[in-house]
Amino acid sequence: MSYILQVDFKMEGPFGNEMVKEFTDLAKSINDEEGLIWKIWTEDSEAKEAGGIYLFETKESECKYLTMHTARLNGFGIEKVNGKIFEVNEGLTSINHGPSK
């Protein structure tokens, strides 16, 4: 079984191509996180929100990452981080062509 982590938070920016420039090294480092399969970066520049959808191999690695990532974001001055953990229903996800690994 795999696990989805949904994270979102308010952020003043950067967004779009500026976000790519500013966060490329961070994105590369996330690939080294224990149990991470993939991440989709999310942003809404009008609402000044950003975040991500992650797939992890285990709930333990996901919880560990959420704790570390929340502390990192707090260090960037982001006070409220919303994080939700879900189990992936792989049977139904496969019907809708969703990646489960």
Image (spheres, helix red, strand yellow):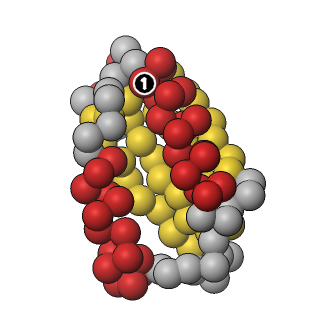
Residue 91 visible from this viewpoint: yes
User: Above or below — where is 50 with respect to 5?
Assistant: below
Is residue 32 shown left or right of residue 82? left
On the image, numbered disc 1 is attached to which residue? 61
Give how far across and how far down residue 70 sits, in percent: 60, 46
Classify mark 1: helix, strand or loop: helix
Residue 93 visible from this viewpoint: no
Q: Quadrant of the C terminus?
A: top left
Choose between 74 and 36: the one closer to the eye.
74
Is residue 53 shown left or right of residue 50? left
Mark 1 residue type: Ser
Question: Which of the 4 quarters of the picture holds residue 67?
Answer: top right
Please give the name of the residue rendered at 28% of the width and 35% of the height, measured from the top-left corner: 37
The residue carrying pointer 1 sits among few (fewer than 14), some (14 to 19) or many (20 or more) residues within 10 Å by Cα, namely some
Please give the name of the residue rendered at 29% of the width and 68% of the height, measured from the top-left corner: 24
User: Above or below — where is 15 with respect to 3?
Assistant: below
